Amino acid sequence: MIDLPLMTYVATMSVTPGPNNIMLAASGVNFGFRRTLPHLLGVSVGNSVQVLIVASGLAWVMAWLDALRLPLVVVGCTYLLWLALRQARAGQPGRGGRVAPLGFVAAALFQWVNPKAWMMVLNIAILFLPRDADWKTAAGLALVCMSVNLPCITVWAVAGARLRAWLQQPAALMVFNYTMAALLAATALWIGADEARTLL
């Protein structure tokens, strides 16, 4: 049975701007769609595995996440700042710049320190998982999430790849990379500031 509210929620959370989509668009510009595919698949599969694990052990994960909230925010924000620096140094399309696209495993693991991914996954588990659910139900939920998430985030990678031809000029590419880097850094700082406000 199709769960339209779940699919709408996953689509909305997947297609709206966030660290994953900013990085996918930037990777599409700098490396093209084909070289961005491992990153793209890593995001979608990693997020689905996260849904499966969280939905399978919600009570345990909620207690664990509360205890690790601050360290997760610190690690996640630090990683976003590192990615922003990496993005600012990205090379010109087709010129074999110093930076390689993010791979499948790195993109999948990033979901575990991505605050937007955690918000999405916890809401999915809390709002859409039946009370008597088992791991099979959680696996079905994860599969639905991946089938909706993948096309939504693909939009960002394709959009980046389409911009690639327009950004062949080094000056234009530099502006784009610095803009994407600034957006990632701003995201990290906003998340960090928001967490600091909750602690005060």
Image: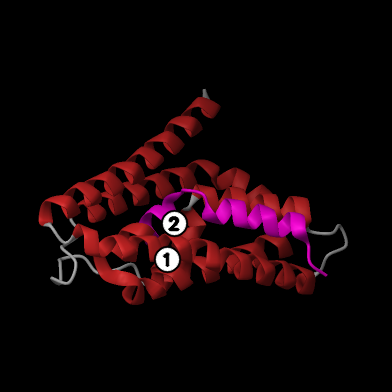
User: Residues at badges 1 and 2 in contact (C-beta under 8 Å)?
Assistant: yes
Please tell me whether residue 17 belongs to the stretch shown in magenta.
yes
In reply to whether residue 8 is colored magenta, the answer given is yes
Q: Quadrant of residue 166?
A: bottom left
Q: Position of residue 96 (x, y in %)?
A: 15, 72
Task: Out of 21 and 76, give the one closest to the viewer.
Answer: 21
| Label 1 packing within 10 angstroms: few (<14), some (14-19), many (20+) | many
Q: Is residue 177 visible?
A: yes
Height in image: 72 above or below 44?
A: above
Which residue shows up at 40% across the image and 64% down it?
A: 157
Tag 1 residue: 107
The number of callouts visible is 2
What is the magenta range?
A: 1-24
**Taking 142 as reference, is 153 left or right?**
left
Q: Residue at x 48, y 52 (%)?
A: 114
Report the amino acid beneath label 2. Answer: Asn
